[in-house]
Amino acid sequence: QVQLVESGGGLVQAGDSLRLSCAASGRTFSSYAMGWFRQAPGKERELVASISRSGATTAYADSVKGRFTISRDNTKNTVYLQMNSLKPEDTAVYYCAADPRHFMSPRLAREESGYWGQGTQVTVSS
């Protein structure tokens, strides 16, 4: 199994930046596509950003495109989410996820598959 631990969440003002980190255990980190999901109260978990196994390909939800950047360092078994120009609507619990497929499935949560971290809270005040 793959164990994922998120960190870097917190309370910030609108317009500020945060960098989330996800540390993964195991020796096969590069065999997984990685992604960041978020879930606000009363809403479904949604895919925010994803990165392919090699890191060559990234994808973003329209709501965060141009503001968020996902990256990975396979030598450190770590994936990052740089969040700039944060808005109150970005407030949510952010989850790191691993998918053994070449690319992250946006339905990973609905499929009840893959590996998930415990989540880290991001709160953006206006």
Image (cartoon, rainbow, N blue to C red):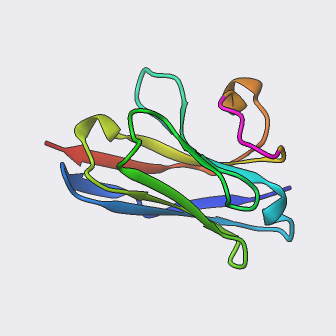
Q: Using residue 86 as the reference point, say whether residue 25 is left or right of it.
A: right
Which residue occupies the extreme left position in the image? 126
Q: Is residue 22 above or below residue 41?
A: below
Residue lying at 41% horizontally and 63% vertically, measured from the top left:
19
Residue lying at 35% horizontally and 49% vertically, measured from the top left:
67
Q: Is residue 53 visible?
A: yes
In the rendered image, residue 105, in percent from the top left (x then y), is placed at: 71, 34
Residue lying at 33% horizontally and 57% vertically, measured from the top left:
10
Viewer-side residue, 16 vs 4: 16
Residue lying at 29% horizontally and 34% vertically, measured from the top left:
89
The quadrant of the image that shows the C terminus is top left
Q: Main secondary structure of the magenta part?
A: loop
The stretch drawn in magenta includes residue 105: yes
Q: Which residues are magenta?
A: 102-106
Q: Using residue 6 as the reference point, say whether residue 105 is left or right of it.
A: right
In the rendered image, residue 40, in percent from the top left (x then y), is placed at: 41, 31
Q: Using residue 119 as the reference point, say whether residue 67 is left or right of it.
A: left
In the rendered image, residue 43, in percent from the top left (x then y), is placed at: 45, 22
Residue 42 placement: quadrant: top left
In the rendered image, residue 120, in percent from the top left (x then y), is placed at: 47, 52
